[in-house]
Image (cartoon, coloured by chain):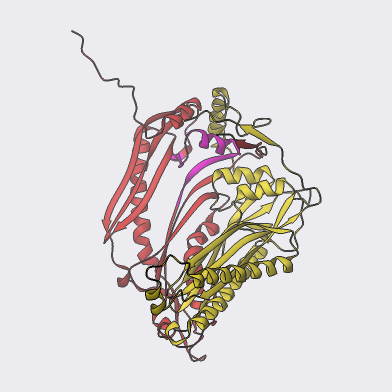
Chain colours: A yellow, B red
Amino acid sequence: MSGERIGSPVSNARLRELGKLLGEGLHLPTRSSKGYASTLSLDDVSLLRGVHCYPMRPLFGAGTYSLYDATKLSTRQHADDLHQSWRLAFDEARQMMLKQAKDVQALGVTGIQVASAFEGSHINVVLSGNAIESAWIEGKQVFPINYREPFLSDLSVLDFVKLTHAGWYPLSLACGAHFVSVNRRDIATAVKQHSQNIELTAATEGLREARAGAMQELQTELWQSGATGVVGVKVDEAEMYGPIWRFIACGTTVWQGVEAKHPEIHYVLPVDD
Amino acid sequence: MTSTTPNTSAVPSMLSPADLAASVAMGLRPVGVVRGYYCGHHVHVSKFSGVWTFQHCPHDDPKHKQAWCGYFKDYDQQWINAYNVAWGRLRDEVHKLGAHGVIGCHTSVTDHESEIEAHHYGTAVVLDGAEALPNGRFWITSLAGHRLARLVEAGYVPSGLWYAHTTVAQNWGCMDYYRTGNGSSGHILPHVREQLLYARQSGLKKFLDDKDAWSLYGLRQTISVVGEPGHLTCVSYGDLVRHVRSENPEYPASTLSLA
């Protein structure tokens, strides 16, 4: 489809031509002996092929760690236990995914989804993403970066393509987490404040502490990886059982290439309803 | 007085107006709506014994191996059979219409209490000027219209649909140790981890073992708890395609919508 781009009109003659190609293609032998499996959409596969990358297969990583009975601990200690077990589970899941990516000789893994489940007696962290590979021409990798180990990224294929086209490259999946125990107020204080319009500072302070702890952990991972920054940070912030709050921030560490440039943007005005 | 007679050339299709227009422009002529359906009773998972692996549990005597992770192949086969029977019925309808393929196909296999329902439906098409595939074969895809055109543009042709159903159990009794507050925090629980991974991976394994140069895209996996405590089911759907041309699509122009 030389010269024609997304956003350009596709004529009836072009569709007719594609219909003929479909008819012919059904009788052609398969070109490559190397198929792929992927959760990516057709659009994602086309985008990847536009930057000379190919999908390989979905990869998974999981970590499961025990959690001591919350009723037998102080809430502060339980928050610390949650943090310890979550961190161990996440690190194990990430390590497992990285190992699998190395085993299949992937360039990296895109679109990683992080799913944490807090069961009463244990914590599960499951990572799922799609391994991709670069095209090779005459024994040379077409993708401009030679990674020492496969990159891990929670960016979608669309974002990965936009990022790399602009000369920035993903490195790894970084996460920071913090769990805090917040006692908003005791009953006596609640009764005393019954007719007052007043901020519950313990909640504000607790969430501030959770956020600061998680971001500090994320920052530490960033320094250790030598990345330029983190993009697409997703925040999972929620009040859990009892007075425990969690704050988990995950994103992709990126590195700015030497020839990074802002892409040329074409403005479009849609005329559909 | 004139009588109105039905237009016998009018053919129903399940396509949206945009998909119909683009499909017709590609030379894909709808010849009818095709459907395959099956409804049956299924046996509860508790009636099956899984194929278990035995490992050392971290909390237990290291000399003693116990049931760890089980795979309920016979239970899963009920779903796969339902899918295949509905598929066979769809195939019969396609053959009756003399169609080359089916576009815009929707597939679902669901259960309610003890009943399984498998459903495939789509629009059968004849491709103008194309030769029929040998041995009564036909192609089928969930795509239609411009999205199908883009598949061809990227060098692929549709072939079929993929479905897998995998049920995996972990030894729930073993978890009692942790559920009742024994042990402490921060101990690895490999049997739970293995189950989480195995449920997702085993659905794909068959494809990866047998793919023989086919490609699978748009894979959708749904994980749910089934029947008994500690049992997980992973249902996988996707589209099978073949890579027949080597064109790489152009990198698209970056646009910013002003709407």
* Quadrant containing the N terminus of chain A in the rendered view: top right
Where residue A110 appears, as percent x and y from the top left, is 62, 56
- Residue B153 on the magenta span: yes
Quadrant of residue A211 within the rendered picture: bottom right
**A82 lies left or right of A55:** left
Q: Is residue A47 above or below residue A211?
A: above
Quadrant of residue A209 within the rendered picture: bottom right
* Residue B194 in view: no
Identify which residue is drawn at 64% across, 54% down.
A132
Spot the residue most to the top: B1
Spot the residue most to the left: B1
Where residue B120 appears, as percent x and y from the top left, is 36, 45
Q: Is residue A84 above or below residue A232?
A: below
Q: Is residue A184 above or below residue B110?
A: below
Residue closest to the eye, A35 or B259: B259
Identify which residue is drawn at 51% across, 59% down.
B204
Where residue A198 appears, as percent x and y from the top left, is 46, 67
Tag count in the figure?
A: 0
Over which residues does the magenta segment extend? B135-162
**B184 lies left or right of B110:** right
Residue closest to the eye, A269 or B166: A269
* Residue B191 in view: yes
Residue closest to the eye, B62 or A262: A262
Spot the residue most to the right: A258
Where residue B34 appears, as percent x and y from the top left, is 35, 38
- Residue B128 on the magenta span: no
